[in-house]
Image (cartoon, rainbow, N blue to C red):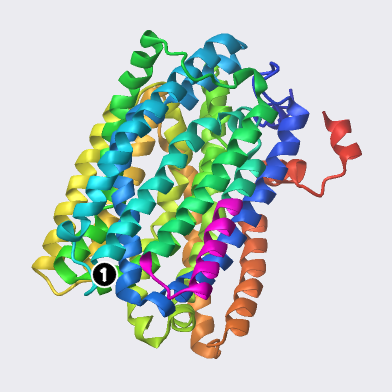
Amino acid sequence: MDNTEQLEEEIGAAGDENVSTTAEGKKRFAQNTASSITFFAYTAVTSLLMVPYLIGRLGVANYGMITLANQFISITQVITVVIVGTVTRFVMLHAAKGDNETAKRYFSTQYTAIVYLVAILLPAAGAISYFAPSLVKIPPGQKLNTQLLFFFCYVAFVPSLFISPLQVGQYIKQRFDVRNLLEMTNQAFRYDTWILLFAVMSPALWQVGIGYVAGASAALIGTWISLVKLTPQLKPKFGIFDKRKFYEMTQMGGWVSVNQVGSMLYLSVDALVINRLMGPASVGKYGTLLGLLAMLRVMSGLMSGMMMPLTISYFARNDIPGLIRNSAKAVKFMSLGMAVPLGLTCGLVIPFITWWLGPEFASLWPVAWLLLAPQVWNSSMEPLFAINNAANKVAIPGVAAVVGGLIKLILAIVLVKYTRMGLVGVALANLIAFGLKNIVFTPIYAAHILNSSSMPFYKATIPSILVFAVTAGGAWWVTQILDISTFVRIVGTGLVLLLFFGLLVYRFAMNDEDRRFLDQVAPWKKKGSAAKQI
């Protein structure tokens, strides 16, 4: 078997009616990649427009309350992940083996459990929302608005409990283009609702919550339709509940929830620490950069999520060498894919923030660097998380995530309370904790599961380190010699540099096998030519 045939196998899957064939896998890879880029561009543009839109109409302190409400939702996920966090793994594993009846029984059991979970969650959400103004610092005169915002954000959280498991059909069929379209639909409904309500009445925080409900509801309807269309044989039925299968999933889900506690400490305590120690206005400022970080994490999550079906397929076939090879390739492509946009963002950060939010926010550039730059390496290791799930080895990563999250929480409190670093201290704590988790622990533990060396994973990130440094340095140098203070100049400069450094990556950071892989899955590849290679 030559390299071309080997690469073709790696983007195909397990070969039954539920999983794409080699030819379809190649087509889906190109289609999914193109849709992910489109989704990222859409998210970037709409976020750049909506953040200053909200701040301009609600004020930076009220914008901070939106950030805080979303952080509370993330904390709630620690509880719900026990029920919803593992069903995809079990359904996909059995579907990959062709056992649709067992997969459907797992799915229906989890679906029934979620319905009962919602009945418990909503009253609890009402109580949390009512007491929210007593738990956090709020802007003057915003008590009722804060309560309503929190409650509507929790109502919007309910559809997401169903959306996550219902996306299993998209994973099995590798239709991430459908998922991206539904995510864009979610955002479109959310933003349109905000614009409409702000236009017909005085802007208020509760209207933001209504927008979240509208977007999540539209996404839920679309996700259900996609499940029925893509995998009708897996359509869950309410009322079917297998206690043994529920116990099996929640046993794994218990450890996943431990990992979620760590994720909450990593991702959701920043706003709480800043709110309690610095006030809601500081949360609003930090929240603007968290939005950028979240946008990049969405992109990296989409890219790493595309690897899950392949990882489970390799694991189900017990093809460990193929899994190692595929995972290392995913790490390399992920890190290179993030290196150039992150390098440009960091290099152009001062003129970008000044144009985007105003000169009073330009002093946030060190915070932006500390939050965004490490994502080159942090995001590159995300494909390895699928190995933990496929092997059902989630206990130790959960404990490690909690320990790392506690380190971050303690560091953030100490640096804010006992130094003059302020927001920089929170971002620095974030950098240290994420580095310990993703750069040190994750690749070593993934290699341990596979009984192999972690060096292939680390070697795969070396080109991205150089690419990021050169890109960020080049972009910063351009800001020193050119005036790029306007939107047109920022975008024009960014596009030119993106093309230039992208070509350098293709020519010098990739080997012949990498370029051959990209050539095979390119969306502009002629069907006839591709067919000849299969």
* Residue 483, x across and y down, in percent: 54, 91
Which residue is disc 1 drawn over? 142
Q: Is residue 497 above or below residue 324?
A: below
214, 15: nearer the viewer: 214
Q: Is residue 396 highlighted in magenta?
A: no
Identity of the amino acid at label 1? Gln
- Point 29% across, 27% down: residue: 255
Q: Quadrant of residue 303?
A: top right
Q: Which residues are magenta?
A: 184-205
Q: Secondary structure at mark 1?
A: loop
* Residue 123, x across and y down, in percent: 28, 40
- Point 42% across, 78% down: residue: 57
Q: Give the residue furthest to the right.
A: 528
As drawn, is 75 to the left or to the right of 193?
A: left
Can residue 361 be seen here? The reply is yes
Q: Is residue 118 above or below residue 351?
A: above
As drawn, is 222 to the left or to the right of 286?
A: right
Q: Is residue 195 highlighted in magenta?
A: yes
